[in-house]
Image (tube, helix red, strand yellow):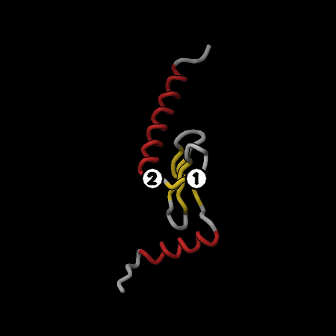
Amino acid sequence: MHDSPKKSPLSVGRVLCSIFGHRFIVTKKVTAHIKEYECACCGKQVTIDVKGNLASLTPQLKEINETLAMLHQKKLAQTHHHPAA
């Protein structure tokens, strides 16, 4: 067998996470309520889905988060330019 050295730490991390759970850290704030996370141990990436649960960060969810972030920034910019009466 030819195992590359890169796979060993990743598989150990996965084993540790399966036993003890993931140690997620915030990698990106999409909005005030939606964030993207990555496990500090195994590198698994997750985000908040439409139901408010953690879900694997798929390319589709990543694209949705990018769109949400853009819309959120536009809304913030408009709020600062046009204060409510």
Q: Which residue appears at 46% of the width and 78% of the height?
A: 8
Quadrant (top left/top right/bottom left/bottom right) for the N terminus: bottom left
Q: Are marks 1 and 2 in contact (CB under 8 Å)?
A: no
Q: Specify the quadrant that holds the C terminus.
A: top right
> What residue do we see at 56% from left, 48% from top?
48
Q: Is residue 4 left or right of residue 19?
A: left
Instruction: In the rendered view, tell whether residue 76 sits above or below residue 56.
Output: above
Residue marked by disc 2: 58
Residue 17 position in % (x across, y down): 58, 69
Other residues around mark 2 within 10 Å, as few (<14) / some (14–19) / many (≥20): few
Tag 2 secondary structure: loop
Instruction: Out of 56 and 16, give the one closest to the viewer.
Output: 56
State the image coordinates of residue 21 (x, y, percent, origin top left).
62, 66
Q: Position of residue 44 (x, y in %)?
A: 51, 61
Q: CA distance from mark 1 to mark 2?
A: 12 Å
Report which residue position mark 1 lands on: 54
> Which residue appears farthest toward the top when viewing the image?
85
Amino acid beneath label 1: Leu
Residue ranking furthest to the left: 2
Tell me the amino acid under the disc marked 2: Thr
Which type of secondary structure does the marked residue at label 1 adopt?
Answer: strand
